[in-house]
Image (spheres, helix red, strand yellow):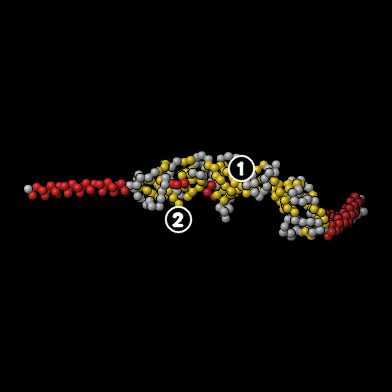
């Protein structure tokens, strides 16, 4: 009876062990292949709206300084005054300059009289020389040279007088364009000159404003989806203003790594002031499209940004850089292609080469 019990027990033990091994293999297989959620990359040619900080600046702005030393005799404007192009704003008195011009004018008149005299003498001798023997050749040459010398002297003195006349023009400061006086830094009686650090007046043309947007370097290869943009400012909560595309710098600022884009704002009503900070909505698009993924698909650590690419059932980390962003999606750049499968929610515990499905 015993000789049958041992084989039966052995068979039962072997069967139980085989079942255990199979179960362990299945559990090991399930643990080694991690179930993940992926997305398929595709090029996005649609526009994307970005929120960027911006600043409003005057379309034209000028600081007016005295070009000549003298005393202010009259200031015709004050802060907030509207002025027209060419309007007289300040008058300056400079006695030395005025005296120098008077002296230069006197020299010109004297030189002109000398020239007219020598010219008449030469003309008279030239006519007389037609009668043989009345005027020697040397006399004629001498008269001609004297007239030419006087002519040269007259031109030189006239040039000097014109230059000094220009200095007199500097005694009157006029508005270079139509605008508003935003600063006044002088009063009658002040001594002013071309070495002043502060301008006497600052004038701004605020009928149009420039909206300046510092666009990040990574986005400068994009094109504007529309010829206009919208923006808001704190003094007018809830109100949206419009600005039309004007120009871009075509140069990257080495400190901020941004390119300045400008838009023009119609401010005929004068509601907006130069110097206001704004928040602008800029719609742009890539010329050839680009790859976009949800924010959760980009794993960001202290050392890098990466996405998890699934290839042949295994995980491969691909380092990326990011570009434009909106509320849900982010633009990525790296060794990726359209159609690649990317992990939707990667984490740092996932290792290179691990099986995923």
Q: Tag on residue 303? A: 2
Pick the quarter of the image with the C terminus: top left
Secondary element under disc 1, as helix, strand or loop, is loop
Callout in the foreground (1, 2): 1
What residue do we see at 42% from left, 45% from top?
A: 344
Q: x%, y% of residue 355? A: 34, 48
Labels 1 & 2 near each other (Cβ < 8 A): no
* Residue drawn 19% across the image and 47% down it: 16
State left or right for residue 356 relative to residue 130.
Answer: left
User: Which residue is at 34% across, 47% downward?
Assistant: 34
Q: What is the distance, in whole Å, between disc 1 and disc 2 at their CAs? A: 41 Å
Q: Which residue is farthest left?
A: 1
> Horizontal and vertical percent for residue 343?
40, 46
**Residue nearest the observer in this picture, 304 or 159:** 304
Residue 108 lies, in percent from the top left, at 86, 55
Q: SS at mark 2?
A: loop
Q: Is residue 303 left or right of residue 66?
A: left
Please tell me in which quadrant of the rendered image residue 167 appears: bottom right
Mark identifier at residue 283: none
Asked whether 39 or 27 is in front, the reply is: 27
Q: Nearer the viewer, residue 192 or 349?
A: 349
In this view of the protein, can residue 100 be seen by the observer? no
The residue to which callout 1 is attached is 238
Furthest residue toward front: 1
How packed is label 2: few (under 14 Cα within 10 Å), some, or many (20 or more)? Answer: few
Q: Residue sitting at 54 percent across and 42 percent down?
A: 49
The reply to whether residue 116 is in sight is yes
């Amino acid at each position: 009876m015993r000789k049958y019990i041992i084989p039966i027990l052995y068979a039962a033990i072997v069967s139980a062990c085989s079942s255990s091994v199979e179960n362990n293999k299945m559990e090991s297989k399930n643990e080694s292949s991690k179930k993940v959620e992926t997305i398929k990359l595709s090029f996005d040619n649609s526009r994307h709206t970005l929120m960027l900080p911006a600043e409003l600046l005057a379309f034209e702005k000028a600081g007016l300084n005295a070009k000549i030393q003298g005393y202010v005799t009259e200031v015709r404007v004050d802060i907030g005054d509207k002025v027209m192009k060419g309007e007289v704003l300040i008058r300056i008195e400079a006695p030395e300059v005025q005296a120098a011009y008077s002296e230069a004018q006197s020299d010109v008149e004297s030189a002109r009289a000398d020239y007219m005299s020598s010219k008449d003498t030469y003309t008279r001798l030239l006519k007389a020389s037609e009668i043989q023997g009345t005027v020697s050749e040397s006399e004629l040459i001498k008269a001609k040279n004297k007239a030419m010398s006087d002519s040269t002297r007259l031109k030189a003195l006239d040039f000097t007088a014109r230059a000094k006349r220009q200095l007199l023009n500097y005694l009157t400061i006029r508005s270079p364009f139509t605008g508003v006086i935003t600063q006044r830094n002088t009063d009658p009686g002040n001594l002013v000159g071309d070495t002043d650090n502060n301008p006497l007046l600052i004038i701004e043309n605020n009928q149009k404003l420039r909206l300046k947007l510092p666009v990040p370097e990574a986005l400068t290869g994009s094109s504007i989806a529309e010829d206009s943009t919208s923006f808001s400012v704190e003094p007018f909560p809830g109100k949206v203003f419009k600005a039309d595309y004007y120009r871009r710098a075509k140069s990257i600022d080495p400190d901020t790594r941004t390119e300045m884009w400008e838009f023009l704002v119609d401010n005929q009503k004068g509601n907006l002031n130069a110097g206001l900070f704004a928040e602008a909505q800029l719609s742009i698009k890539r010329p050839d499209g680009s790859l976009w993924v949800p924010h959760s698909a980009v794993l960001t650590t202290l050392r890098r940004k990466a996405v998890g690419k699934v290839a042949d059932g295994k995980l491969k980390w691909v380092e990326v850089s990011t570009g434009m962003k909106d509320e849900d999606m982010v633009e990525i750049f790296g060794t990726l292609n359209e159609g690649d499968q990317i992990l939707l929610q990667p984490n740092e515990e996932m290792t290179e080469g691990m099986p995923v499905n």
